[in-house]
Image: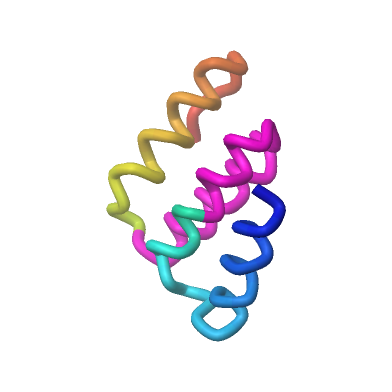
Amino acid sequence: YKEARKILEKLLSEAPKNDRLLMELANTLHDEGKRSEAQNIMKRIIEVNPNHSDALNYLAYSLAEEGKALK
């Protein structure tokens, strides 16, 4: 995961609003067990694309799992 994250972060430095790359980074962070960081990336995706269904679903599901209010 570490190598994948490095590659994705480099690509994102060149295209910081690319929601596909952001989604891959979030999934990589999630697989690493870094759920809070993955949630933050999902929030960035939603800022770029407010109708991104996968990011919205991930964020809603993870917040519900944690018993947090959905805003």
* Tally of numbered tags: 0
Q: Quadrant of residue 10?
A: bottom right
The question of residue 12 being in magenta is answered with: no
From the viewer's perspective, tell me whether residue 33 is left or right of residue 68: right
For the residue pair 49 and 19, the one nearer the viewer reads as 19
Give the colouring mode of the picture: rainbow
Residue in the image at 45% along x and 58% along y = 45
6 in relation to 17, above or below: above
Residue in the image at 58% along x and 42% along y = 39
Q: Residue furthest front?
A: 3
48 in relation to 55, above or below: below
For the residue pair 42 and 26, the one nearer the viewer reads as 26
12 in relation to 32, above or below: below
Residue in the image at 53% along x and 59% along y = 44
The question of residue 28 being in magenta is answered with: yes
Residue in the image at 54% along x and 26% along y = 63
From the viewer's perspective, tell me whether residue 19 is left or right of residue 63: left
For the residue pair 27 and 41, the one nearer the viewer reads as 27
Bounds of the magenta segment = 25-49
- The prevailing secondary structure element of the residues shown in magenta is helix
Q: Quadrant of residue 34?
A: top right
Q: Position of residue 48 (x, y in %)?
A: 42, 66
For the residue pair 1 and 13, the one nearer the viewer reads as 1
